[in-house]
Image: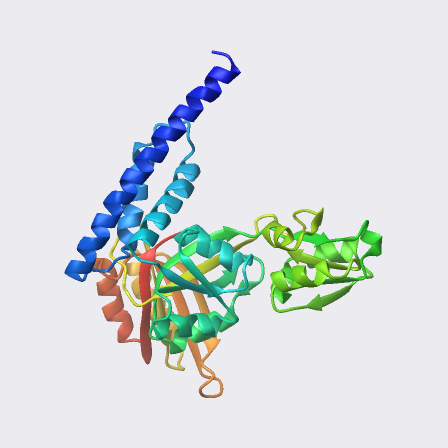
Amino acid sequence: MDLDEWRSRINELDEQILKLLNKRAEVALRIGELKRRQELPYFVPERESEIIRRLLALNPGPFPAEGVKAVWREILSASLALEHPLPIAYLGPQATFTHQAAVLRFGSSSTLVPVRSIPEVFDEVEHGRAEFGVVPVENSTEGSVNVTLDRLLDSDLSITGELLLEVTHHLLGRAPELSAIRTVCSHPQALAQCRQWLGTHLPDAKLEEVSSTVAAAERAAGDPTVAAVASELAGRLYGLSVLRSRIEDNPANSTRFLVVGWRGMPPTGKDKTSLLCSLTHEVGALSAFLDPFARHGLNLTKIESRPTKRRPWEYVFFVDFEGHVDAPPVQTALAEIRQRCLFLKLLGSYPSA
């Protein structure tokens, strides 16, 4: 066939896909009606995960697995929006990396609500104004986001999911050349993640910290002597040119985000559990705490201490390990661990990213 014939074939397939999508939407509406009558939760994350895992197992190619996940995330998001709007709070404003993580997890048809701070994300979910919240918790270059850890200590919400997002920073602006740039602004973590590049290529520029990468893009849009370190999405939002792309010092730079909510997650077979605890101030306390993890075959993926901010020199440990709280080895290990802690709080079991 020639090019026009192949394009005609593509058009036919697109029309078939569109008809099937609308048939699927009709079924989703019927399911929504049944859920309302039976007072069942309208959003069941484990069902969404099951659908995507099943399709990935059935996919023969050549359509890529990542493409399947991205397409069905949007299909599921749009279908859920027909049943019931899903409000999601995230650390705003729009076009931040947290916004991108929220879209990646819940799709663009969700009702995404930007708020000004991480504590506000927790507040929105705790007061029922949002079903879930998305917050950054650690960066592979700069380490933990302490505000998130502190809020987990005080909140009754559970961790219901995690996402890993590759973080790529670009130098955005309206300057005709780098020599015209007098100021580079961005969020403190973004500036820190590009410190070496900025020191090499813009050694005389003033570095200015602002509340977000998007706030930096907004500032750069109004002054050609100012450049922003931000995402390409933020540049499109404010009509900025990409002066230099991928200026992060570490090419493997990524950020881990948490999804917080009220409802616990059932086991999926590839789960992670998070907890925090405080230990006695005595020799061998940490070793005794860690011993049950090793004996019961539980792999620790993170351990970090933080001040409680309640009493001077009082600390808690944040711990992540592989496994679900419902699994017998985890339950046995936790029973032993509780006896060795002054205080222990389970933060949630959830599918690993």
**Which residue lies most toward the top here?**
1
Residue 182 visible in the picture: yes
Query: Which of 98 and 130 lies nearest the eye of the viewer?
Result: 130
On the picture, is 189 further left or further right than 298? right
Residue 281 point in image, percent of width and height: 40, 82
Residue 19 point in image, percent of width and height: 32, 34
Residue 2 point in image, percent of width and height: 51, 12
Residue 116 point in image, percent of width and height: 52, 71
The quadrant where residue 283 appears: bottom left
> Who's the residue at 23% across and 70% down the image?
335
Q: Indicate whether 83 appears above or below 19.
A: below
Q: How is the image coloured?
A: rainbow
On the picture, is 86 further left or further right than 142? left
On the picture, is 77 further left or further right than 32? right
Query: Which of 54 and 120 lies nearest the eye of the viewer?
Result: 120
Residue 317 visible in the picture: no
The quadrant where residue 96 appears: bottom right
> Who's the residue at 40% across and 36% down the image?
65
